[in-house]
Image (tube, rainbow, N blue to C red):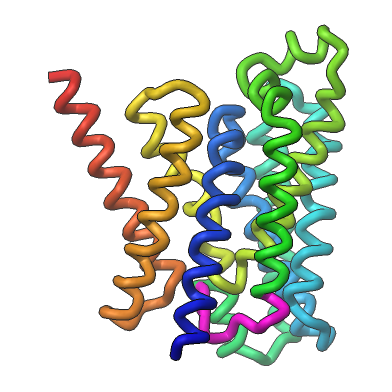
């Protein structure tokens, strides 16, 4: 029981840190739907892994990174309409997931990837999440200035000679790896909520770039711990419980903003 709780806390803290940090950037860049698109890519990778008898986490990682690379490539041809690229990829990955699932006779295990289940998280999955957290934190520390610049004005950043394309690709790959790694804990159908909802709640309070980022991380931690408690008490999937907690946090921040306006 103690090992289970320790694993639970580690996953909650790690995913809160990386999802809130990435979600903050994605929301500012009007790419909040990219998390949803990549989560469908992760689902396609999971079903492919089950169909082929390969570790689904590994196939989800590979497939989601490929999806991220394709999205960044197609975005060059739709510079003003990024949502078209996301819609294209979402349609294709959903279709592939449906096809692969037809050959994967593992409804119970697939359900864990759809809605999240900490009970099915292996030591490999936990180690993967820890390593990913370290990588993402280092990435943000090293590139925080550049991420801020491209989030505020990408064209100006490109004119200044900064490697905007390389930063965009690296951010997409990091996001893809995060989505794939968190799929088994939070669930592919709700992982995008972990990316978007904390950032959306923090932005309502308008505290500036860095303070909003820190507030987003704090809200994500509260959501995770609240979701854990709700999941335990109500015996519901962890991913769904965390999203309900995040929706409550968003509602509270909205009420605070309304009260300030009044």
Instruction: Please provide percent x and percent y for residue 102.
Output: 71, 82
Q: Is residue 186 among what the camera can see?
A: no
Q: Tell me, yes or no, if residue 170 can be seen here.
A: yes
The percent position of residue 146, horizontal first and vertical second, equals 73, 24
Q: Residue at x 56, y 59 (%)?
A: 15
Q: Quadrant of residue 204?
A: top left
Taking the spot 70% from the left edge, 48% from the top edge, the residue there is 136
Residue placed most toward the observer, 177 or 189: 177
Q: Is residue 217 above or below residue 238?
A: above
> In the image as oriented, which residue stretches furthest toward the left?
262
Given residues 11 and 110, the one toward you in this image is 11
- Specify whether 197 is left or right of 71: left
The quadrant holding residue 54 is bottom right
Q: Name the side, left or right, on which 32 lies relative to 77.
A: left
Q: Where's the N terminus, which quadrant?
A: bottom left
Which segment did they paint magenta?
A: 116-125
x and y, in percent, of residue 249 in the image: 30, 48
* Quadrant assignment for the C terminus: top left
Q: Is residue 149 magenta?
A: no
Residue at figure coordinates x 55%, y 71% from the top left: 185
On screen, residue 71 above or below 176 = above
Q: Is residue 142 above or below residue 182?
A: above
Residue 218 image point, x, y percent: 41, 46
Q: Main secondary structure of the magenta part?
A: helix
Query: Which residue appears at 54% of the width and 81% of the height?
Result: 111
């Amino acid at each position: 029981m103690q090992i289970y709780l320790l694993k639970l806390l580690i996953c909650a803290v790690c995913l809160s840190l990386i999802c809130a940090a990435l979600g903050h950037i994605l929301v500012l860049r009007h790419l909040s739907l990219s998390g949803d698109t990549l989560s469908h890519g992760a689902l396609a990778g999971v079903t492919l892994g089950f169909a082929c008898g390969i570790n689904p986490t590994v196939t989800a990682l590979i497939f989601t990174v490929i999806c991220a690379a394709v999205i960044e490539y197609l975005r060059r041809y739709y510079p003003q309409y990024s949502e078209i690229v996301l819609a294209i990829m979402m349609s294709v990955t959903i279709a592939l997931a449906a096809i692969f699932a037809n050959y994967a006779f593992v409804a119970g295990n697939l359900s864990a990837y759809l809605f999240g289940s900490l009970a099915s998280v292996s030591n490999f999955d936990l180690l993967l999440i820890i390593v990913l957290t370290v990588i993402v934190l280092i990435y943000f520390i090293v590139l925080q200035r550049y991420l801020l610049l491209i989030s505020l004005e990408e064209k100006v950043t490109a004119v200044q000679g900064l490697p905007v394309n390389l930063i965009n690709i690296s951010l997409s790959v990091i996001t893809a790896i995060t989505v794939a790694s968190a799929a088994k804990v939070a669930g592919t159908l709700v992982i995008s909520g972990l990316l978007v909802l904390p950032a959306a709640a923090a932005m309502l309070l308008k505290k500036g770039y860095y303070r909003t980022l820190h507030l987003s991380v704090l809200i994500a931690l509260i959501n995770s711990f609240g979701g854990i408690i709700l999941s335990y008490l109500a015996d519901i999937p962890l991913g769904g419980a965390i999203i309900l907690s995040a929706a409550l946090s968003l509602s509270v921040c909205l009420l605070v903003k309304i009260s300030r306006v009044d």
